[in-house]
Image: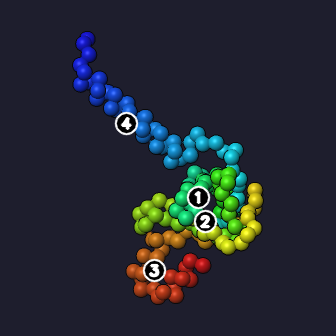
Amino acid sequence: MRDNPTEVIVGGVVLAAAIGFFVYASQATGFGQASGGGYTLQANFRSAEGVAVGTDIRLAGVSIGAVSGLQLNPETYRAETLMSIEAGVRIPDDSSVAVATEGLLGGTYVEIIPGGSWEYFAQGDLIEDTQGAISIVQLLVKFAAGGTEDDVGAATP
């Protein structure tokens, strides 16, 4: 067989694209990142719809960690979440956390809304001020059924 220079170039481009996709996927999922450099916080949500292990934790729109554990508490029926936060990111102890989405069809992430305290969360602390996921489908059904604004607010305590 003889080597065609065009085939070699196209093969190189395909290989470079495959490597690029692999690097992007590993960074997006947190694969290969060191887990020993941060600390863990806890939060309990009424609804953690769309949240899974690996979901981004964001502060001011910047990714500062990922969800490292998620389970249902059978006694309280709340989603208990473990969040791994990067070392060096200090979060005030009066901060709140909410499950948010990127637009109507976007992905889900966990947003930390910082408070104004001079004290900070430490390893293993529980963030008590939480807001669960708001179901867009439930809001649309209430709107289509002619529900009032008070009815929608009552559906998402």
Estimate the x, y position of residue 33 in percent, counting from the top left.
60, 42
Label pair 3/4, CB-CB below 8 angstroms:
no
N-terminal of the two: label 4 or label 2? 4
Of the numbered discs 3 and 4, the one sitting upstream in the chain is: 4
**Label 4 sits on residue:** 17
Residue 147 in the image: state x and y as whole percent.
Answer: 45, 86
Please state which amino acid type lies under the numbered disc 2.
Answer: Ile
Most foreground residue, 84 or 43: 84
- Disc 3 versus disc 4: nearer the observer: 4
Q: Earlier in the sequence, mark 2 or mark 3?
A: 2
Quadrant containing the N terminus is top left
Q: Is residue 60 left or right of residue 76?
A: left
Find numbered disc 2 in the image and state the secondary structure of the residue it sits on: strand
Disc 3 residue type?
Lys
Q: CA distance from mark 3 to mark 1?
A: 30 Å
Contact (CB < 8 A) between labels 1 and 2? yes
The alpha-carbon separation of the residues under discs 4 and 2 comes to 35 Å
Q: Quadrant of residue 65?
A: bottom right
Image mark for residue 57: 1
Mark 3 packing: few (<14 Cα in 10 Å), some, or many (20+)? some
Q: Earlier in the sequence, mark 3 or mark 1?
A: 1
Spatial separation of the CA atoms under disc 2 and disc 3: 28 Å
Residue to which mark 2 is pinned: 112
Per the model, the C-alpha gap separating discs 1 and 2 is 7 Å
**Residue occupying image coordinates x 55% and y 56%:** 63
Residue 46, position in %: x, y?
A: 63, 69
Is 133 situated above or below 12?
Answer: below
> Residue at horizontal 45%, vertical 71%?
137
Residue hosting label 3: 142
Do residues under tags 4 and 1 come within 8 Å of each other at their CB atoms?
A: no
Going 58% across and 39% down the picture, which residue do you hit?
Answer: 32
